Image (tube, helix red, strand yellow):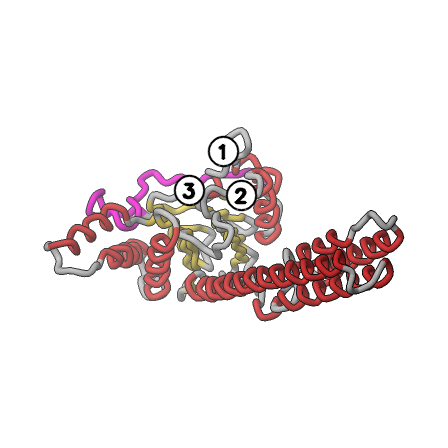
C-alpha cells in the first residue's frame, strides 16, 4: 500500500465510508439547529453543537475539524438571531464556548493527524525494509510452482524473525525457511544474516552440507560486539549473544529432472507432503542442530532424500503456525486441516490455510508465521 495515497483529510478511510462519516457532524448541526429554533424560549440546545467538532476531530484532519467548528458557530449565530438577538448574553456565551471548544478540537485533530502521518511513514519504511530483507519468492522456478505467505504477530510489524528464500542453481531450485530465536529487531537481524548468507552461497555451493556451513557462519557473525575479545563488557556481551542466537532452518534442494527432494533439517518443524489426499510428514532420522549452536551441539549435517513427483505439493512452515491457539488454548491442527485441501494449487492452498489459521486464532497469532507451498509441475516439452 502506497502511503502517499493515504494523505487526505480523512486518513485510512474508504471514499464511501469517509463521506458517510463526514455527513455525521453536519447532520448533528442541522438537527440541533432546527430543534433549538422550534423549542420553547426556556429550552436551549445550542450547547450540544460542540458535539459536531468533537466528533469530527476523532476521524478527520485539522482543516475539516476547523471547518465543522466554523459551521457550528454559524449555526449557533443563526439560532441566536432567530430566537432573540446575536447580542443576547446567553447566546454570546454559548458562541464563545463553542469557538473555544472548536479550537481545542482542531488542535487535537492536528496532533492525531501528525501521529498518523508518523506511523504511516514508519510503515512505509518497514515495508521497504521487508522488500529488501524478505524478498518475495518467484511464482515459478523451473518445474516448480511456488507461493508464500508471511503473517507477523505484531500488528504494526511487516516482518519478524521468520524467513524464507529461494535460489535457482544449474540443476534445480534451493529453498530455505527458518525461524530466528526471539522477537523484534534482534530476530530480524539474525534473519537478515541468514538470508544474506543463503543468497550469496546457495548458487555457488554444490553440496547441501557446505551450504549449511556458510549459513552457520552467517549466524555466528552476529556475535561480534564492541570491545576486545575476551576482555571487559564486550566479551561478556558476546558470550550472552552466543548463548541466545540461533536459527532453526530447513534447507531443500529440488532437482529439475529427478522426482525427489533433498533436505537438511536444522531443528525446524518437518515439511508436509500433500499427495493424493494424504498428508505425509517428511521426518528426518537425524536432525542437525539449529544454526548457531554448532559449538554446543554436534555439528553433524544429514542430507535425506524423499520422493517428490509431479502433482505433489510440499508445505513448509514455521512453528508460529502449529503453535497458534484457539480460545480453549488448543494448538492448531495443521495436518488435519490440510487433508481437505490436498488437491489445491499453492496459492489457493495458502489462501485457505491463512484464512483458517487467523479465524482459529481469533485474528491474533502469538508468534510470527511463515508458509511456503511448492508444487512440482509436469516438465515442459
Q: Which residue in the structure is indicated by mark 3?
A: 270
Mark 2 is surrounded, within 10 Å at the Cα level, by few (under 14), some (14 to 19) or many (20 or more) other residues, namely some
The one nearer the camera, 138 or 1, is: 1
Q: Is residue 307 visible?
A: no
Q: Is 348 displayed left or right of 374 in the figure?
A: right
In the depicted structure, whether residue 213 falls above or below residue 267: below
Q: Position of residue 353 (x, y in %)?
A: 58, 45
Q: Secondary structure at mark 1?
A: loop
Q: Secondary structure at mark 2?
A: loop
> Residues in magenta?
277-302
Question: Is-magenta flag for residue 296?
Answer: yes
Instruction: Give the number of the mark in front: 1 or 3.
Output: 1
Contact between marks 2 and 3 (CB within 8 A): the answer is no
Question: What's the distance in space between the residues labelled 2 and 3, CA to CA?
Answer: 24 Å
The one nearer the camera, 201 or 377, is: 201
Mark 3 is surrounded, within 10 Å at the Cα level, by few (under 14), some (14 to 19) or many (20 or more) other residues, namely many
Tell me what residue is drawn at x 86 percent, y 55 percent.
37
Picture quarter containing residue 188? Answer: bottom left
Q: Position of residue 12 (x, y in %)?
A: 63, 60
Of mark 2 and mark 3, the one earlier in the sequence is 3
Q: Which residue in the structure is indicated by mark 1?
A: 331
Q: Quadrant of the C terminus?
A: bottom right
Q: Residue furthest top?
A: 328
In the depicted structure, whether residue 264 falls above or below residue 278: below
Q: Is 81 displayed left or right of 168 in the figure?
A: right
Res 364 label: 2
Tell me what residue is drawn at x 17 percent, y 56 percent.
234
Amino acid at each position: 500500500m502506497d502511503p502517499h495515497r493515504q494523505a487526505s483529510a480523512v486518513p485510512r478511510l474508504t471514499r464511501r465510508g469517509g463521506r458517510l462519516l463526514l455527513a455525521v457532524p453536519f447532520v448533528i448541526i442541522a438537527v440541533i439547529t432546527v430543534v433549538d429554533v422550534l423549542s420553547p424560549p426556556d429550552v436551549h440546545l445550542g450547547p450540544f453543537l460542540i458535539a459536531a467538532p468533537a466528533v469530527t476531530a476523532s476521524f478527520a484532519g485539522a482543516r475539516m475539524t476547523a471547518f465543522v467548528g466554523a459551521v457550528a458557530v454559524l449555526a449557533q449565530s443563526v439560532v441566536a438571531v432567530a430566537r432573540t438577538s446575536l447580542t443576547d448574553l446567553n447566546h454570546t456565551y454559548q458562541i464563545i464556548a463553542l469557538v473555544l471548544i472548536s479550537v481545542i478540537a482542531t488542535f487535537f485533530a492536528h496532533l492525531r493527524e501528525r501521529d498518523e502521518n508518523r506511523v504511516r511513514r514508519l510503515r512505509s519504511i518497514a515495508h521497504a525494509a521487508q522488500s529488501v530483507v524478505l524478498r518475495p519468492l518467484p511464482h515459478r522456478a523451473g518445474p516448480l510452482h511456488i507461493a508464500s505467505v508471511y503473517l507477523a504477530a505484531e500488528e504494526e510489524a511487516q516482518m519478524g524473525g521468520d524467513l524464507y528464500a529461494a535460489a535457482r542453481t544449474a540443476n534445480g531450485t534451493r529453498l530455505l525457511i527458518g525461524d530466528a530465536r526471539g522477537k523484534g529487531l534482534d530476530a530480524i537481524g539474525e534473519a537478515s544474516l541468514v538470508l544474506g548468507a543463503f543468497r550469496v552461497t546457495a548458487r555457488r555451493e554444490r553440496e547441501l552440507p557446505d551450504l549449511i556451513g556458510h549459513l552457520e557462519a552467517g549466524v555466528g557473525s552476529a556475535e561480534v560486539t564492541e570491545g576486545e575479545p575476551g576482555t571487559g563488557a564486550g566479551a561478556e556481551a558476546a558470550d550472552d549473544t552466543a548463548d541466545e542466537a540461533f536459527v532453526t532452518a530447513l534447507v531443500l534442494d529440488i532437482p529439475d529432472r529427478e522426482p525427489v527432494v533433498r533436505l537438511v533439517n536444522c531443528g525446524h518443524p518437518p515439511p508436509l507432503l500433500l499427495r493424493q489426499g494424504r498428508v505425509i510428514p517428511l521426518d528426518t532420522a537425524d536432525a542437525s542442530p539449529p544454526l548457531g549452536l554448532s559449538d554446543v551441539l554436534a555439528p553433524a549435517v544429514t542430507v535425506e532424500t524423499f520422493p517428490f513427483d509431479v502433482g505433489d505439493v510440499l508445505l513448509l512452515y514455521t512453528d508460529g503456525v502449529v503453535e497458534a491457539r484457539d480460545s480453549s488454548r488448543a494448538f492448531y491442527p495443521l495436518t488435519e486441516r490440510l487433508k481437505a485441501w490436498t488437491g489445491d494449487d499453492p496459492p489457493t492452498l495458502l489462501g485457505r490455510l491463512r484464512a483458517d489459521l487467523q479465524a482459529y486464532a481469533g485474528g491474533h497469532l502469538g508468534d510470527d508465521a511463515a508458509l511456503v507451498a511448492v508444487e512440482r509441475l509436469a516438465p515442459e516439452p
